[in-house]
């Protein structure tokens, strides 16, 4: 854990400023950072002097590489079978903060430069004005540690075109800023070097009761984008959409077999295939079921369902084994409980979708 992890909270003119700062862990979120974000957002929601909030991160490598998974791991291994108090509190408060972002009454501008994974992607998705740069790299690699694309992933992945969301959730494939724009997940691309000018332009907005704050921010960002050339790599997804849709057709078992049969020299698709085939078979099943059952849900229902699943997962040893292999011992040789999807007993999979408590801690979001 990064003992220097924090959220830097500032205010400049009518703009609230939130900067993720955890230099040792690529700005990964700790529980304290989640609480700091929630506190600042709550304090500014009804503050008439704050017209919009700008969220970014320190350093050049990452916006946020996810949550503090090692702390979740310790909570899981120290409390086998649960309750895992720290991990479960982290999920509850992180999802509550994510929900706050999605429902926020003022424009939230997020600068998604560098690595944006897991919990960082959850923050990015919740903001109303999502900026990518020439070095943005998204991923939801949860299948590799036997988790699932949470922080609202059950909501935003299901709203991407075609089978893109299913593909990204099952394969841990990375994608860039152009992909984010194509999938409707990002709003504007700007060069990293333009951030000071963007902040100056936002501070110079003449807020008016006659125009919505969201529209004024959109006009500001679009005007800058029209002037700033952003040299970046082409997207991975759009030229491969037909392949993605074909690979992700059918049941989870059929999708798995589609990837087994994939014979290609395409390096991006090959890496995606390897991510799926080397991931936890149990996780593949609960990821795909979660995406399926959450499709008709509203946002509050999604976060309730994600907390249910996340709580059950962290109490199960598959998650701890995945984190051990990837992040603790780093042998990259997880000993998954099951060798194949067919080996997973249906009643066991069902248990992950049964409430582990009498009342969901996020039930108040439904009201």
Image (cartoon, rainbow, N blue to C red):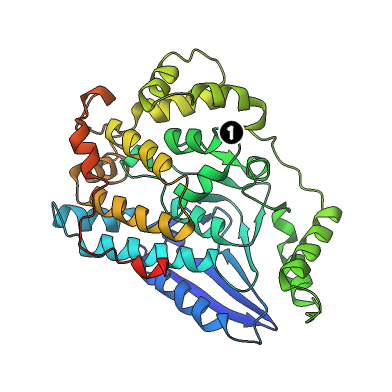
Residue 42, position as x, y percentages in the image: 50, 79
Taking the spot 56% from the left edge, 72% from the top edge, the residue there is 18
Q: Which quadrant would the C terminus be assigned to in this image?
A: bottom left
Taking the spot 44% from the left edge, 23% from the top edge, the residue there is 250
Taking the spot 32% from the left edge, 34% from the top edge, the residue there is 285
Is 291 left or right of 352, judged from the image as shown? right
- Residue sitting nearer the eye, 57 or 100: 100
SS at mark 1 in the image: loop
Taking the spot 37% from the left edge, 64% from the top edge, the residue there is 30
Q: Is residue 361 above or below residue 154?
A: below
How many numbered circles does the render carry?
Answer: 1
Residue 182, position as x, y percentages in the image: 67, 40
Residue 360 found in image quarter: bottom left
Is 76 left or right of 207, judged from the image as shown? left
- Is residue 335 visible to the viewer in this orientation of the structure? no
- Is residue 313 visible to the viewer in this orientation of the structure? yes
Residue 25 found in image quarter: bottom left
Residue 7, position as x, y percentages in the image: 48, 72
Mark 1: few/some/many CA within 10 Å (<14, 14-19, 20+) = some
- Residue sitting nearer the eye, 354 or 256: 354
Pointer 1: what residue? 162
- Residue sitting nearer the eye, 13 or 184: 184
- Residue sitting nearer the eye, 304 or 18: 304
Is 236 left or right of 67, judged from the image as shown? right
Q: Is residue 246 above or below residue 353?
A: above
Residue 249, position as x, y percentages in the image: 48, 24
Q: Is residue 204 above or below residue 247?
A: below
Q: Is residue 248 above or below residue 121?
A: above
């Amino acid at each position: 854990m990064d003992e220097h992890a924090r959220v830097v909270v500032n205010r400049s003119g009518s703009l609230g400023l939130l900067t993720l700062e955890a230099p040792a862990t690529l700005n990964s979120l700790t529980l304290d950072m989640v609480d700091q974000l929630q506190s600042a957002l709550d304090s500014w929601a009804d503050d008439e002097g704050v017209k919009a909030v700008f969220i970014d991160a320190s350093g050049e490598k990452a916006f946020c590489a996810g949550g503090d998974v090692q702390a979740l791991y310790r909570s899981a291994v120290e409390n086998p079978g649960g309750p895992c108090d720290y991990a479960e509190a982290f999920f509850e408060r992180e999802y509550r903060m994510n929900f706050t972002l999605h429902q926020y009454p003022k424009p939230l501008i997020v600068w998604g430069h560098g690595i944006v994974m897991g919990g960082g992607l959850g923050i990015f998705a919740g903001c109303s004005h999502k900026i990518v740069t020439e070095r943005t790299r998204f991923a939801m690699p949860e299948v590799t540690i036997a988790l699932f694309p949470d922080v609202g992933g059950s909501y935003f992945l299901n709203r991407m075109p075609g089978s893109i969301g299913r593909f990204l959730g099952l394969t841990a494939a990375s994608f860039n800023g152009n992909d984010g724009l194509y999938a409707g997940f990002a709003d504007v691309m700007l060069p990293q070097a333009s951030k000071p000018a963007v902040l100056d332009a936002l501070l110079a907005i003449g807020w008016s009761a006659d125009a919505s704050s969201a529209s004024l921010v959109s006009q500001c960002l679009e005007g800058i984008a029209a002037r700033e050339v952003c040299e970046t790599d082409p997207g991975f997804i759009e030229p491969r959409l037909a392949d993605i849709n074909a690979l992700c057709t059918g049941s989870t078992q059929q999708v798995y077999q589609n990837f087994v049969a994939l014979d290609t020299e395409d390096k991006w698709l090959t890496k995606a295939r390897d991510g799926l085939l080397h991931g936890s078979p149990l996780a593949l099943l609960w990821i795909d079921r979660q995406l399926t059952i959450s499709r008709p849900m509203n946002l509050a229902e999604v976060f309730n369902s994600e907390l249910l699943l996340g709580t059950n997962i962290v109490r199960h040893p598959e998650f701890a084994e995945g984190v051990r292999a990837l992040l603790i011992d780093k042998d990259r040789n997880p000993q998954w409980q099951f060798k194949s999807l067919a080996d997973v007993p249906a009643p066991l999979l069902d248990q992950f979708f049964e409430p582990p408590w009498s009342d969901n801690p996020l039930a108040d979001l439904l009201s």
